[in-house]
Each structure stands twice: as structure tokens, then as C-alpha cells.
Image (cartoon, rainbow, N blue to C red):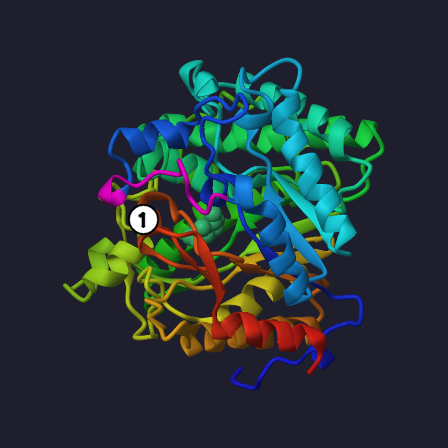
Amino acid sequence: MTDPAHPGAFPADFVWGVATAAYQIEGAAQTDGRSPSIWDTFSRNGGVVEGHSGDVACDHYHRFPEDLDLLQWLGVDAYRFSIAWPRVQPAGRGALNPRGIDFYDRVVDGLLERGIQPWVSLYHWDLPQILEDAGGWPARETAFRFAEYASLVYDALGDRVTGWITINEPWCVSFLGYAAGVHAPGRQEDVAAVRAAHHALLAHGLAVEALRAKGAASLGITTNLYHVMAASDSEADIDAARRVDGLQNRLFLDPVLRGAYPADVIEDLSAVSDFGHVHDGDLELIGAPIDFLGINYYSRYTVAAASSDNGQTDAASAKAGAHGARRAPWVGSADVVFRSSGLPLTAMGWEVDSDGLRQVLVRVAREYDAPPIYVTENGAAYPDVLRDGHIDDRDRIAYVNGHLAACAAAIAEGADLRGYFLWSLLDNFEWSWGYTRRFGIVHVDYATQVRTPKASARWYRQLMAGD
Ligand code: IFM
């Protein structure tokens, strides 16, 4: 897995890209009619370290031509970005805000002028606050609101966008937002989290139905998958790993790719929910064929049963397993703990396990009747140092290189992987961590908004050019 990745190991039409998301880079939070999102509220209410918010972020809203030039310089085939729902449909319903959608119209045209495919994520976590006030994702109605919004955005941009991703990481939307409370809207209600997960999936299904009716031919969803390992071969640890895999991976993969919730996960969650919120017909909608599956991969989990834990759980790993949350997102599985495997950590405290990506890709290909796959996010935060105008982020290069080698290995083992989007183009607002974690291959000086490509950007550029 240490061999350098080389484009020669990938199909000639492999899609090379980078990814971002609206709230993390745009800023202009009160501009041109944008309404508050749950992340504006969560930031204002102290949910983010050091009081950071996305008010200004990378000021991409005003500087996008410069950022599109950076993409052109990099030589990517594709750019994945998200649409801010509160910018284009501030009331969460009804006609689009012309000034809001016009911004994305210009982004899309700017990409096409530079020969770059636009890939759009319709929901990357910035729910209009007005819809949270009406119940948020635990409320069924939100899924219908999303389908209306998706449909209107498709009407505006559908003639020029290459790939449509409905929901980004429904696990984070539901379990980090509504169970752990470490993401917006910061609720800690297990029942609500299980409902939110279903409604995020239903939103996907309803949007697919609506966009298909309009002729869309490249629709998918992005799940954040982990390679989950049991800490030992004891029955208790194997069962703990099964539970975490169930909640993190299968609760989302099975409905989308098999049209059914996994029976063991329903059973695990029985003390929390009777799944009465699942209506007849929902799973047919959610399981309707998609054109691709997006996979975001960052790390692995090594899981043990609390009952078998003899004080071996290392604090950093336990924290990583729970995404830094004081209250774990593992609804219905309070008895699981996370162990360190002794692998190197990124600045997020996440273990670097490139082979886990190979395993995830091969597993999805083998266990599911999967459509073509795209890695829609992969990358790492490191404590970059800007020295004489340069950032020599060789740890990030090694991370991406290792994960690309894993992608090549998965393709060789039969995974139908069609593309890779590095997270992220720019340093940006890393959710509850604010600006204290940097994932970009381009450094952003938040005081001046000066962009400086890191060594990793030059490396990725050369790699994509086939040098
Ligand atoms: O920054 C996030 C992104 O918004 C969603 N996937 C994980 C990234 C790193 O945490």
C-alpha cells in the first residue's frame, strides 16, 4: 500500500477532482437574501470552538473567480461543491431567490468555461433554520421540502451539471446533529436521530424521483463509510463491531442499495425506536436505482465491548470514535468503546488507515449490487506550518498517496471506482472545530484571504497531469 499512486493505475476516464461545501467556504452569510441556517444558529449559540462561524469563511462568495482559476491551474476534471439551501430558497419553500441561484449559475458557467465538470451536492448540512424551527430532519415534512428545493435547483442548473449528490453523509446529519449534538442543530434526542436518518434517506428518495421525472441521468448519494474492526476475536467485541458497522455503514447502504433496513440494526435500535416513522412505500423510493454511490472515507474504527474493556481504551481513540463528542452518537449501543490501533493520527485524532479504504470499496462492490462508485471525499487535516511562503505538507501528500494506492488496489480487485475527489480545495470552516483544523491543499490566510497552494497541491497537480 506504500507504492506511489500513479494515474496509470486508473482507467483513462477516471474523474480527478477536489471538493468543498457551501457553509465551509462561502461566507456572505447575510448577503443577497440568504436566510440563517442551522449552522449560523449553532455557531452563534457557542457550538463551535473559539466562537468561530461561517460568516466570512474563505469569502468564496466574493472570490469565486480566483478559486475557479485555482481549480484550472490544478488541472482537475471535476469540482464538487454544494448549494446553500438558505441562499437559494430562504423560506425553505416556494420559488427560488434569484440572487441566490444566480451565484451558482455563475459558478457553474465559470467551471464550464474552464473545462471543469460541475458536481453538485444539494445538501451539505446547512438546513434553513426556518425548517429546523418546524421540526428539522426528525419531521417527515422536511424530506418533502428538500425534494421541492432539489427540483427547483435542477430546473435552474440541470442542463449544465455533471453529477448530482442528494444528501452528503446522512449519518452525520442525523447522529452528530440530533444524538451527539456535536453538530447543528445540537439536539441530543436519540429517537429524533433515528427519525432524522430515515427522513434524510427519504429526502434522497423523493429527490431522485423528482429529478428522474425531469430526465436526470447522474444521481447519487454520499455516505461516509468506515472500515470497522473488532478489537479481538471475542464474541463480545465482534458483536460490538457489528453494531457500529450497522449504525455507521449498513443503516444507510442497505436502504439505498437493497431497499430495506438491516434487521439486526432495527433490533439493536428497538429500545429507541419502533421504526413507526417508516411509511409504506418509503423504502421503494429510497431504494430506487441510482447512477452512482458517493463514498467519503477518512479513517477506521477498532471497536470493543465495554464489558470486555480492561481499561485499555485509549482516550484519544475513544474520542475519535465519538467524533470528539461528549455524548456518543452510537444510539442504542452505549456499550461500545473505541480502541487505538497504534496507527498515526491526523490533526483530527483520526487514525490513518489507507487499507481501510480498499476494504470499504471492495466490500461495497462485493456485498451490494452497487452502481459505479466515486470517492467523493478523502483527505486529512494536519498542523501545517507556513514558512517563507511555503507549506511543506508531506504528511498530507503521504496520506493522499496511500489512499490513492488503496483506490487502485480496489479497482484491481473489481471495485467499479470511477473517480476521486480530494477533500479539500481550500482550508475552511471545519464545523465544530471552526478554523482550527486545516484540510486544504491550498492554504487560506483568514486575515487577508490570501490563498497559497501547499506542496500537496503541486503534487496533486503533477499526479493528475500524469507527470
Ligand atoms: O469537512 C468535512 C466535510 O464537510 C464532510 N466530510 C468530512 C470532512 C472532514 O471532517
Disc 1: CA contacts within 10 A as few (<14), some (14-19) or many (>=20): some
Answer with left or right where residue 332 lies relative to residue 390: left
Q: Viewer-proximal residue, 94 or 344?
A: 94
| Residue drawn where x is 75% and y is 34% of the image | 157
Image height check: is 15 above or below 431? below
Magenta highlight range: 49-59
Q: Which residue does the numbered mark 1 point to in the structure image? A: 433
Answer with left or right where residue 128 lies relative to residue 76: left
Place of residue 406 in the rendered image (x, y in percent of width and height, measured from the top left): 57, 74
Image height check: is 166 above or below 90? below
Q: Viewer-proximal residue, 263 or 34?
A: 34
Is residue 55 in the magenta section? yes
Place of residue 88 in the rendered image (x, y in percent of width and height, measured from the top left): 60, 25
Three-letter amino acid code at the position of disc 1 = Trp
Q: Main secondary structure of the magenta part?
A: loop
Is residue 262 in the magenta section? no
**Visible residue check, residue 181:** yes
Question: In the displayed image of the protein, which residue is found farthest to the right?
Answer: 215
Image height check: is 429 above or below 34? below
**Visible residue check, residue 205:** no
Residue 96 sits in which quadrant? top right
Place of residue 259 in the rendered image (x, y in percent of width and height, measured from the top left): 66, 38
